Amino acid sequence: MSTRLEEQTRAEIVEAGRRMYARGYVASNDGNISARLDESRILTTPKSVSKGFMTPDMMVIVDYEGQKLSGDRDASSELPMHLEIYRNRPDVNAVVHAHPPLATGFAVAGIPLTRAVLAEVVTTLGSIPIAEYGTPSTAELPAAVRKYIKAHDGLLLANHGAVTCCRTVMTAYYKMETIEHFAKISLVARLLGREHLISREEVERLQGLRGMYGIAAPAPLCADPSELAATDQILCQVLEAPEAGSARLVPDDATSSRLLPDVATSSRLVPDVATSSRRVPDVAATLRQASRDGEIRLTYGELTALIADAVKNLRE
Ligand SMILES: [Zn+2]
């Protein structure tokens, strides 16, 4: 018999699926959502159905071993990943899995979202690592997720997508929104050429505010991230946040941005473009910019002007 809680949970899953599809986090019949009903039953989305057009009666009820208890349809083949999360996280009541394109792009590129750059992400999720690739629908995927899930409410899945968990269906869904929004902002910042990281001191302050907003901390920051390599199951978070002094010194102009910590500059996709409107290169100034290793730094404008000048000289 359907209780009021069950009806409400069915409706929440329908709504989260509708939003997930509307926002383009899934294509076709991708993605899945589940929620605990009680200590012996889980409500989950059916396989082979667009998550944008579900109705409450489509849901499947399974036990914690994944055996179907009721429902006309079959549960998603990714159910074992959900069950693994429930086993490892007694505090969690809902799991959302999707393939949001920007976050999945990071997962495909092998770039985790572990830099402290947005206050709300530091507060709600902390870091978002990448669980190693596992063939979908096999035991590999739950095993990959198991390694990180005790310390994280949100994970990227290598060459696949993302998964989030929280106390309710909607809060788990919102974490998925936060991950995709964060991925979008991170991509823009990296295309622009730099990311100013929030200091470790500020990160600790932000995480200390979690209680005020009723946000449960997934895990503390790791004291020594190098120890994690040998760990079977990670119990703390690695977040790239420099010590207060270096973060405060992060400058805003192109030249001195070379003082940024390696972590903030290592993966630039494009070089800085100086604001200078000079058309003809100032060779003396360029040479003065040569760094100690003999590298000459040119802005995009200066390089273009040099090439244009060389082509002009060839013609003359
Ligand atoms: Zn998937």
Image (cartoon, rainbow, N blue to C red):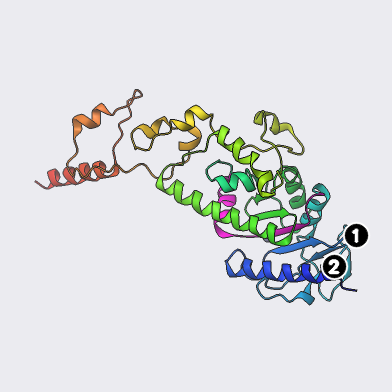
**Position in image of residue 182 (x %, y %):** 55, 51
Can residue 128 be seen at all in this image of the molecule?
Answer: no
Which of the 4 image quadrants contains residue 294? top left
User: Relative to residue 36, is residue 225 drawn left or right?
Assistant: left
- Three-letter code, disc 1: Ser
* Kind of element beneath mark 2: strand
| Frontmost residue, 218 versus 106 | 218
Residue beneath the point at 76% across and 75% down: 56
Circle 1 Cα neighbour tier, 10 Å, few/some/many (<14 / 14–19 / ≥20): few
Q: Are marks 1 and 2 in contact (CB under 8 Å)?
A: no
Q: How many marks?
A: 2
User: Relative to residue 80, is residue 99 drawn left or right?
Assistant: left
* Kind of element beneath mark 1: loop
Residue 231 is marked as: none
- Three-letter code, disc 2: Ile
Q: Which residues are magenta?
A: 90-113
| Frontmost residue, 249 versus 50 | 249
Sequence-wise, the earlier of marks 1 and 2 is: 1
Q: Which residue is mark 2?
A: 61
Q: Which residue is mark 1?
A: 40
**Position in image of residue 217 (x %, y %):** 70, 43
Q: Is residue 280 magenta?
A: no
Can residue 22 be seen at all in this image of the molecule?
Answer: yes
Which of the 4 image quadrants contains residue 292? top left
**Position in image of residue 221 (x %, y %):** 66, 35
Q: Is residue 117 above or below residue 16?
A: above
Residue beneath the point at 48% across and 50% down: 187
Residue beneath the point at 73% across and 77% down: 55
Name the residue furthest left. 316
